Amino acid sequence: MLCEWMHSAAESDPNAWIFASEAGGTPVGRDNLLRRNIRPRLEKVGLGWVDFKVMRRTNASLGKSAKVDPKASADQRGHGIGVSLDVYTETSIERKTEAAQQLEDSVRGRKVVLIRQEKAS
């Protein structure tokens, strides 16, 4: 796919930006990318309020739920694991409920039983 892009790109220099600005000499600005390309598509499906932070949190949280390696997931967003987990990753309500149940069982001296059921693929 990258080879096809390189052959069809206006700029044939192998060091050219993949996502170049209209002028071609600089990378496209993230705000321009969001305003011109991403937001119009999001608005069509009622998600015009979404910004890059929402997309980062979604990526982090879905990655955690899918058990993606935390380092690989953090690398995708350009952050260390600490920032990734502390700032961007949201814990699902199911996991929070399970944690509360585990703590309650521990305090009451009951055997800790995981209440989560794995979904069949």
Image (tube, rainbow, N blue to C red):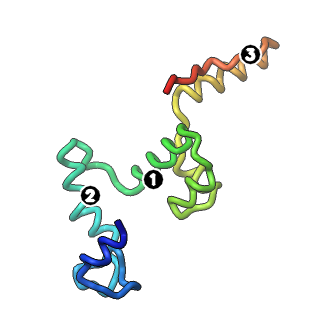
Judging by the rendered image, the residue that carries numbered circle 2 is 38
Element type where label 2 sits in the image: helix
Instruction: Count neighbours of disc 2 (C-alpha within 10 A) and say few if under 14, some if 14 to 19, many if 20 or more.
Output: some
Identified by mark 2, the residue type is: Ile
User: Mark number for residue 71?
Assistant: none
Identified by mark 1, the residue type is: Arg
Q: Distance between the Cα atoms at labels 1 and 2? A: 14 Å
Q: Residue at x 52, y 33 (%)?
A: 92
N-terminal of the two: label 1 or label 3?
Answer: 1
Judging by the rendered image, the residue that carries numbered circle 1 is 56
Horizontal and vertical percent position of residue 20 = 30, 78
Quadrant of res 106:
top right
Element type where label 3 sits in the image: helix
User: Mark number for residue 105?
Assistant: 3
- Quarter of the rendering occupied by the N terminus: bottom left
Which marked residue is nearer to the observer: mark 1 or mark 3?
Answer: 1
Q: Distance between the Cα atoms at labels 2 and 3? A: 46 Å
N-terminal of the two: label 2 or label 3?
Answer: 2
Identified by mark 3, the residue type is: Asp
Q: Residue at x 52, y 50 (%)?
A: 88
N-terminal of the two: label 1 or label 2?
Answer: 2
Q: Can you say whether 35 is above or below 65 in the image?
A: below
Q: Are marks 1 and 3 in contact (CB under 8 Å)?
A: no
Instruction: Count neighbours of disc 3 (C-alpha within 10 A) and say few if under 14, some if 14 to 19, many if 20 or more.
Output: some
